[in-house]
Amino acid sequence: MLKTFLGPKIVMVTFLTLMGAFGLNLTAGQFFAPLNDTYGWDLTILSLAVSLNMVIWGIFQPVAGKMIDRFGPKSVIAGSATLMGSAFILSSTITQLWQFFLYYGVLTAIGFAGCGSMANSVLVSRWYVKKRAKMLSRSSMGMNIGQLILLPLTGFLIANSSFRMAFVVLGLIMLVMVVPCVLIVVKNNPTDIDQMADGETVKSITKTKSVPLSKALKNREFWIASLGFATCGFTLYLVTMHLPNFAVDLGGGKSLGGQLLGIAACGSAVSMWITGQLTRVMGKKQLLIILYVVRLFAFMWLAISPGIWQLYVFAVVYGISSMPIIPLVTGIIGDQFGKNAMGSILGFSWLIHQVFAALGVFLGGYLRTMAGNYTPVFWLGAALLGLGVVLTALMKEQTIAIKSKTALQ
């Protein structure tokens, strides 16, 4: 039996995994301009490839959840991270449009589905019960740090080397740094090494009656939480994929988008830490409403105040309300339906999130082409966020899962 509780190392590895996974998957927008310059592929077509990525990712979320239930999170996360890193290295060889669709739109998405937020949330939830909300927030900060480091790095590599070198470096980060850490450190369950959740020394049995997916799909609270989460997906990926191109439209350099997304990630990391500390005091629902309102105002600002300096203000305000929404929704789903159902139910909620994310990416490119600017789609994003606020306000914070705990001496 290990004397030191492995939980903190599990959180550290999930942090690193999310840093790589989100950092890679969210760089696509920065490749739009160089791919257009090199091959003449227009924004609408490139946006469609990213939309394909979003849809494939969403479709494979429930699949990854089932695989985690059967094989455990370790093998799924490690295999998925390997696929994702390999797909990025393959992307450095693209000369035809179909290759970008295959490598980024399909293979990267499948890999991301198995090593992204859902898979790592399930892993952390197996190791922590009492401190779950706090540890989910800490591990989820990897999403922010990945953007903070890898998005500016991508912009730097594209501006000073080539988009091919950027693909290679990003792929190697996943293969050389993330995959070995998962394989060496991660254990699927505390009981695999004779430990218990939260590092407890008194053995306890926690019985959780989890709601099946079929019942969740008939539940009002599931659809309220998931549709609110969908407005997050639409606006999150609209910004991530199109902000770099919007910055170029306003006269900024090709590396400005990466810098802005890095600033947003920094604000998100701070917000993630704060919301993790405030969850028990204010509750997940109230924090979620606040974050949706902040993002709503950020989108309104972006729509009415186009200019380079306004982009910096937007990056800070938007960043505060970006990634912290994810662990809050994850926690709400777990509270409502039980941690043992998180794979399938959370996976389906992510599917809805990703369908809207794909719609946001595609409409961003389409409406930009039709209108000549991004203003219409920014207002559409603001309207959807208003809907997210209303839906979240209607949510009932109740625990459907039935729990009982018996201490054994």
Image (cartoon, grey):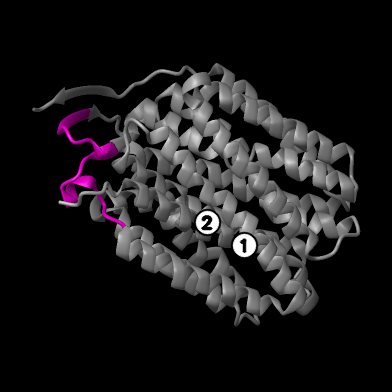
Q: How many marks?
A: 2
- Whether 201 is among the magenta residues is yes
Circle on res. 290: none
Disc 1 marks a residue whose amino acid type is: Leu
Give the image location of residue 319, x and y in percent. Answer: 68, 42
Identify the mark nearer the N-term, 1 or 2: 2
The answer to the question of whether label 1 and label 2 lie on touching residues, with beta carbons closer than 8 A, is: yes
Q: Is residue 401 left or right of residue 31?
A: left
Residues rendered magenta in the picture: 186-207
Residue to which mark 1 is pinned: 150
Image vertical order of residue 137 relative to residue 246, above or below: above
Q: Which residue is mark 2?
A: 19
Please report the residue visible at 34 percent of the width from the left and 21 percent of the height from the top.
Answer: 400
Q: Is residue 224 among what the camera can see?
A: no
Residue at 36% of width from left, 44% of height from top?
A: 124
Rendered view: 138 above or below 51? above
Q: Nearer the viewer, residue 182 or 67?
A: 182
Could you say whether the residue bearing mark 2 is in a helix, strand or loop? helix
Q: Residue 326 in magenta? A: no
- Give the distance between the C-alpha atoms of the residues marked 1 and 2, in whole angstroms: 8 Å
Is residue 110 found left or right of 400 in the rendered image? Answer: right
Q: Is residue 112 above or below residue 158?
A: above
Query: Hey, what amino acid is under mark 2?
Result: Met
The quarter of the rendered structure image containing the C terminus is: top left
